[in-house]
């Protein structure tokens, strides 16, 4: 019977092929750990300047349970789906003030002024502070393009001790630098963007208990938003206050994102408007579920209420942007899922950067992946990378669970992954949600789906 089933198979079994670009959905960057994303719009593109978490090298094994960062990369995207890694821009070996054994290149930021790009980053200094420790200083690297090359200043900014720099250039041209060191501090910057123009000031009226760090300040409709991670209960959540001056005071107003559902102790974010939509960039530990100091950046849409308050953002796997039907569609980054009979797991738990797979365990289990762009040129087939020991059938529908079936894909019995190609019985142009429904009573695993000719 199984042979008959197989002989009826319209699918063409292709040899295993490797995936196309994996830079889409959440997390955004799929080949390295990234954290603390500072997103900026430069020259019509979104640039993200994250921290670059790495597994602790052997010579640092004494601190293997702590953050470990040696350098920074910058990434850019025009569609928030395909990200380009422009490579390493600054490292701990670039300036004499940095303790180059400390692997402490924490959360950075970057702003543009008069055609120059100023990249601000914290790192452990070689100086011993009043507590006998090598404290954090904040350095600046300058470039003519957002992707570099950056030239790192020989000295860190005088008068600043702390982490997580963030810079706001106000509408009148005055620049402000914010950072954290127990409290959240602010000071004016000189026109040269390299020196303070005022004494550091602690921003008052913020929560007294629980760690506060990672300030991100922006202006919208004349309101200034001070947003920051704060430990109100167990781990960091993203909170904000609103004021009418970049230096505050800010009135604590609400929570932007609750504590991480994945248990990641830190969160760190940025908020940016791009093509008339606001976005929250943040991080979880998607690729490192058992060690939350190896994190991954994400993005979701953010909305304001009419009174200027911020609606709480629920972290999603789907993220933002359209996915081209002809790209690998990672349905495990779903928008909706049946609450039983289907689950997500790593393709290879020993190498999490291989990504995830969807495991349909029961008949009628389904998963929905929104905003797939089918374009306007007729696509005639679908390829599915699947694995099922007992075989099965998948229905591919559009828009919702009882939307039109565009094809049924027969999955042959196999011990390994197969790429199966099946003709489409229907093609609908434009943007649709994709729904995949299993018609098998036994497990069927899917890595990705892609439409083509
Ligand atoms: O990435 C190291 C530190 O973790 C950052 O500087 C903090 O904001 C937290 O995300």
Image (spheres, rainbow, N blue to C red):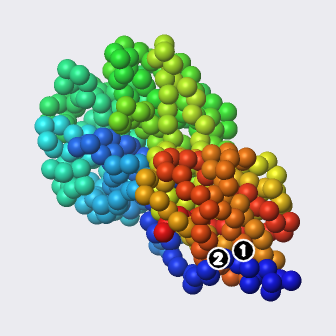
Residue occupied by mark 2: 11
Can you name the residue that lies furthest to the bottom here? 3
User: Which mark's residue is nearer the viewer, 2 or 1?
Assistant: 2
Instruction: Work out whether residue 121 or residue 222 is closer to the camera in this orientation and state it.
Output: 222
Q: Is residue 431 left or right of residue 169?
A: right
Name which residue lies at 30% across and 30% down: 168
Q: Is residue 26 visible?
A: no
Location of the N terminus by quadrant is: bottom right
Whether label 2 lies within 8 Å of ligand 1 gets the answer: no
Residue 432: give its label: none
Q: Quick one: label 2, few (<14), some, or many (20+) residues within 10 Å? A: many
* Residue at x-position 23% and y-position 43%: 43
The image position of residue 252, as x and y in percent, is 52, 18
Q: Are marks 2 and 1 in contact (CB under 8 Å)?
A: yes
- The quarter holding residue 74 reads bottom left
Q: Give 26 or 117, whichever is nearer the viewer.
A: 26
Residue ID at (49%, 62%): 379
Disc 2 or 1, which lies upstream in sequence? 2
Dot 1 corresponds to which residue? 411
User: Mark 1 near ligand 1 (CB under 8 Å)?
Assistant: no
Disc 1 crowd rating (10 Å Cα; few below 14, some 14-19, many 20+) is many
Q: Is residue 285 visible?
A: yes
Image location of residue 386, percent across then percent down = 67, 72
Q: Eyeballing the image, is 425 above or below 107?
A: below
Figure check: 274 above or below 15: above
Would you place residue 290 above or below residue 310 in this image?
below
Left or right position of 392 against 43: right
Task: Judge left or right: residue 272 versus residue 383.
Answer: left
Badge 1 element: strand
Residue at 30% over, 46% down: 45
């Amino acid at each position: 019977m199984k042979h008959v089933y197989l002989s009826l198979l319209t699918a063409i079994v292709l040899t295993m092929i490797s995936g196309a670009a994996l830079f889409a959905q959440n997390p955004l960057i799929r080949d390295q750990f990234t954290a603390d994303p500072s997103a900026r719009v430069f020259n019509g593109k979104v640039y993200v300047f994250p921290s670059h978490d790495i597994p602790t090298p052997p010579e640092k094994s004494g601190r293997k349970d702590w953050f470990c960062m040696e350098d920074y990369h910058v990434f850019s995207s025009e569609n928030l789906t395909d990200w380009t890694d422009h490579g390493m821009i600054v490292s701990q070996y670039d300036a004499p003030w940095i303790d180059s054994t400390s692997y402490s290149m924490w959360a950075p930021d970057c702003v543009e002024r008069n055609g120059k790009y100023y990249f601000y980053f914290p790192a452990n200094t070689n100086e011993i502070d009043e507590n006998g420790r090598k404290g954090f200083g904040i350095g600046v690297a300058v470039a003519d393009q957002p992707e570099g090359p950056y030239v790192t200043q020989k000295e860190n900014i005088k008068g600043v001790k702390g982490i997580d720099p963030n810079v706001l250039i106000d509408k009148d041209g005055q620049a402000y630098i914010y950072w954290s060191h127990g409290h959240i501090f602010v000071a004016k910057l000189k026109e040269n963007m390299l020196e303070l123009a005022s004494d550091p000031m602690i921003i008052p009226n913020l929560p007294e208990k629980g760690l506060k760090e990672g300030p991100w300040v922006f202006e919208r409709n004349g309101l200034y938003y001070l947003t920051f991670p704060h430990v109100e209960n167990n781990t960091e959540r993203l909170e904000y206050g609103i004021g009418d001056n970049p230096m505050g005071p800010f009135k604590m107003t609400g929570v932007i994102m609750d504590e991480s559902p994945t248990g990641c102790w830190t969160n760190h974010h940025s908020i940016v408007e791009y093509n008339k939509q606001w976005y929250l960039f943040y991080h979880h530990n998607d690729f490192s579920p058992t060690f939350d100091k190896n994190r991954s950046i994400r993005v979701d849409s953010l909305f304001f209420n009419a009174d200027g308050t911020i609606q709480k953002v629920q972290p999603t796997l789907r993220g933002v942007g359209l996915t081209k039907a002809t790209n690998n569609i990672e349905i495990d980054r779903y928008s909706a899922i049946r609450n039983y009979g289907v689950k997500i797991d790593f393709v290879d738990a020993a190498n999490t950067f291989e990504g995830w797979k969807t495991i349909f365990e029961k008949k009628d289990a389904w998963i929905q992946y929104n905003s797939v762009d089918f374009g306007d040129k007729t696509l005639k087939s679908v390829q599915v990378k699947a694995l099922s020991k007992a075989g099965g059938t998948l229905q591919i529908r559009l828009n919702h669970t009882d939307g039109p079936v565009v094809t049924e894909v027969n999955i042959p019995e196999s011990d390994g992954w197969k790429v199966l190609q099946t003709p489409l019985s229907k093609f609908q142009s434009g943007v649709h949600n994709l729904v995949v429904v299993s018609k098998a009573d036994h497990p069927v695993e899917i890595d990705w789906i892609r439409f083509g000719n």
